Amino acid sequence: MTNSAVRALGAGLALLALLSACASAPAVREEDERARIAREGPQATLDRAKALYDEGEGERAQAILEILLASPSGRKVEPEILFAIGRIEFERGRYDAAAARLDRGLRDYPNSDAAFETQWLLARVHTRRGHPELSVPLLKSLRRQGLTDGEKGRLNQDFAEAYEVAGNPMTALWWYQRADPLLATEAEREDARERVRRIVEEKLSPEQLPEVAYLYRDNLIGDLASERLAALRAEPATPLYDMTGSPAADYTLPTGPVEGAIGVILPLTGPQASYGARLLRAVLLAGGAFRADDDGPIVELVLKDSKGTAEGAARAARALADDERVAAIVGPVVPAAAQSAAEVAESAGVPMITLTPAAGVTAVGP
């Protein structure tokens, strides 16, 4: 058989397969479907459409659901219909159409059995539409529900995606770190790790890489950041080329959107760096950054490195006092540094709690 004959035969078989597929999935006739809905009832029709969706026939399932939605008996299961159509539109990438159906379901039936999953999917739709400012409030309200660990993991992953779309990769990494141990399957965990890899390789600036390598130094995120950092340091064209010394340690630990933040001044580099690292761990735990569950307040910590010196502490305190988010300051540790920072905090009118055992420091400041 010649090559041209083989190609012709292949094309013929492909056409035959296409025609067979079309024959096995006939178009939905509205008149026939209305009659069947009248016979079997709305719930049975909804279940039939769901079964078709599970079998991969989303287009046929949606056609049936649209007819059911327009029928008088469809009102009995309207919240479930709107969610089902919204899910199909979402998976087709038609996010505006999905948002319209899901928003209607949530608005008209806020207390239905489908309200929870409708709200969750609507949050994901808003993220995909590029509107994390709409998705994050919806996700936050879902955190108050009684969730399984697997659901908490998926919700944390949705938070991460929303913050990534919002252009905040540091916050996204924090949510991915929380999601990983809670996700139910290895496939879900691998998906989250791939997203983390993408953020580290594509979204973090050279200035953020040392911060991430330092903050997540005991897990995959820190390892990826360290690898990326090493690669950039080997490239003469990058600002990190041949950079040596301790990582930059002035950064925000993003634990979520809050009104106000706590400034923290610690010796993260310099002679007291090892002590500062232990205190940092204690501060993070106290702030709830590594809580095992989702209860309690979310605290944003803005970390500044004093380098163990009075001058460094004063500069850090001044930077925190100028930060509109900072409502109070914790630290420093070294007595001279604490005194300098307290004087700056007093002049700026920002409350400060010192970590030093030195006497008299608490008398300074508002």
Image (spheres, rainbow, N blue to C red):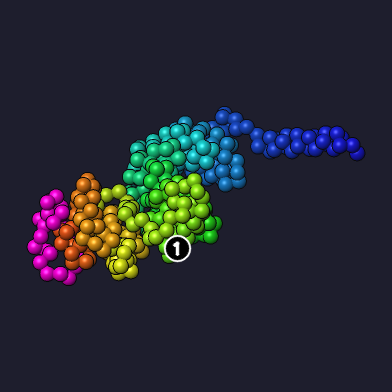
Would you identify the image quadrant in which residue 104 lies?
Answer: top left
Q: Is residue 82 visible?
A: no
Q: Is residue 318 visible?
A: yes
Identify which residue, 110 or 96, lies in the foreground: 96
Percent x, y for residue 229? 47, 55
Q: Secondary structure at mark 1?
A: loop
Q: Residue at x 42, y 34 (%)?
A: 100
For the N terminus, the quadrant is: top right
Give yes or no for residue 231 being in the magenta stretch.
no
Would you identify the image quadrant in which residue 106 lies?
Answer: top left
Q: Residue at x 45, y 63 (%)?
A: 219
Looking at the rendered structure, the kind of residue marked 1 is Asn
In the image, taking residue 192 as reference, residue 342 lies left or right, namely left
Q: Residue at x 38, y 60 (%)?
A: 246
Identify which residue, 71 or 118, lies in the foreground: 118
- Can you say whether 186 is above or below 75 in the image? below
- Can you say whether 71 is above or below 163 in the image? above
**Residue farthest to the right?**
1
Percent x, y for residue 123? 40, 43
Q: Residue at x 75, y 34 (%)?
A: 15
Percent x, y for residue 261? 24, 52
- Can you say whether 261 is above or below 181 in the image? above
Would you identify the image quadrant in which residue 298 lies?
Answer: bottom left
CA neighbours of label 1 inside 10 A, class few (<14), some (14 to 19), many (20+): few
Number of callouts in the render? Answer: 1
Q: Which residues are magenta?
A: 343-366
Identify which residue, 86 or 304, lies in the foreground: 304
- Can you say whether 105 is above or below 279 in the image? above
In the image, taking residue 15 as reference, residue 162 lies left or right, namely left
Identify which residue, 312 or 316, lies in the foreground: 312
> On the image, numbered disc 1 is attached to which residue?
219
For the C terminus, the quadrant is: bottom left
